[in-house]
Amino acid sequence: IAGITQAPTSQILAAGRRMTLRCTQDMRHNAMYWYRQDLGLGLRLIHYSNTAGTTGKGEVPDGYSVSRANTDDFPLTLASAVPSQTSVYFCASSDRARSHHNEQFFGPGTRLTVL
Amino acid sequence: AQSVAQPEDQVNVAEGNPLTVKCTYSVSGNPYLFWYVQYPNRGLQFLLKYITGDNLVKGSYGFEAEFNKSQTSFHLKKPSALVSDSALYFCAVTPRAAAGNKLTFGGGTRVLVKP
């Protein structure tokens, strides 16, 4: 089934630990995004990538890093997790090669709790 | 910087009645505007978008939205709500000049349709 997969589904993590959230898409979209969703704040963009090999900072990038070694994968790493990073994380992709205003497709999310 | 306001945290409506979810935005220049819906424990799903042209945009599941430039609004509407429309709805904006990147989301409006 075409779409975006995220792993893990949920995770409880001790503060200070390193964590990588995985995201894979099979739609061959060139652009990918990471958001965090917090109650009342909607979704906020963490990092994005317009094409493999390039990344950019979003609204709330501090404490997070990303890489885009190929078209399909866009992992998000928390180098040293803190409780304020407790959130639901969504990966998304869009076909910017076809149109700059294309809608984004979202994965099912990863629920992360940092204690 | 762009912003989106969804003034209602929750909207309650009886099944069969009209549904309206409000959205106002602030952006430099002309906007691209989007509505997404999120069902429980799922990622966001695209409903509709305004790019240019006709101010009334029709989307999935019988939803439509009207772009009003003078009021900087993009309210989502459905003539006759269904119980299955109960979900969390997000409005999003990006300036046309940003070429579709960096969507800014509103805080979301929970819709509850009662039988």
Image: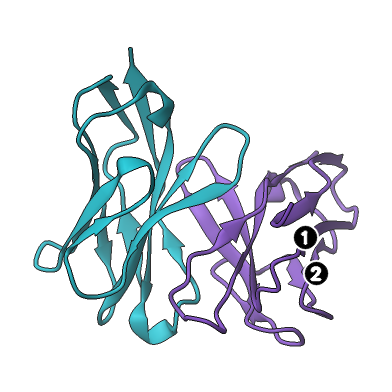
Chain colours: A purple, B cyan
Image position of B72 with respect to A9: above or below: below
Closer to the camera, B112 or B57? B57
Quadrant of image for the C terminus of chain B:
top left
Question: How busy is the neighbourhood of tag 1: few (under 14 within 10 Å), some, or many (20 plus)?
Answer: many
The quarter holding residue B19 reads: top left
Image position of B27 with respect to B13: above or below: below
Quadrant of image for the N terminus of chain B:
bottom left
Residue most toward the front? A1
Where in the figure is residue A46, as x and y percent of width and height?
62, 66
Q: CA distance from mark 2 to mark 1?
A: 6 Å
In contact (CB < 8 Å): disc 2 and disc 1:
yes
Closer to the camera, A15 or A110? A110
Image position of A107 with respect to A103: above or below: above
* Residue at point 71%, 57% (across, down): A2
Tell me the residue that label 2 is attached to: A73
Closer to the camera, A111 or A61? A111
Residue most toward the left? B70
* Residue at point 33%, 15% (across, down): B114
* Secondary structure type for disc 1: strand
Residues tagged by mark 2 and mark 1 found on one chain of the structure:
yes
Image position of B19 with respect to A2: above or below: above
Question: How busy is the neighbourhood of tag 2: few (under 14 within 10 Å), some, or many (20 plus)?
Answer: some
Amino acid at the residue labelled 2: Asp
Closer to the camera, B79 or B110? B79
* Residue at point 57%, 84% (across, down): A97
Tell me the residue that label 1 is attached to: A23
Amino acid at the residue labelled 1: Cys
Where in the figure is residue B106, as x and y percent of width and height?
39, 53
The chain to which mark 2 is attached is: A
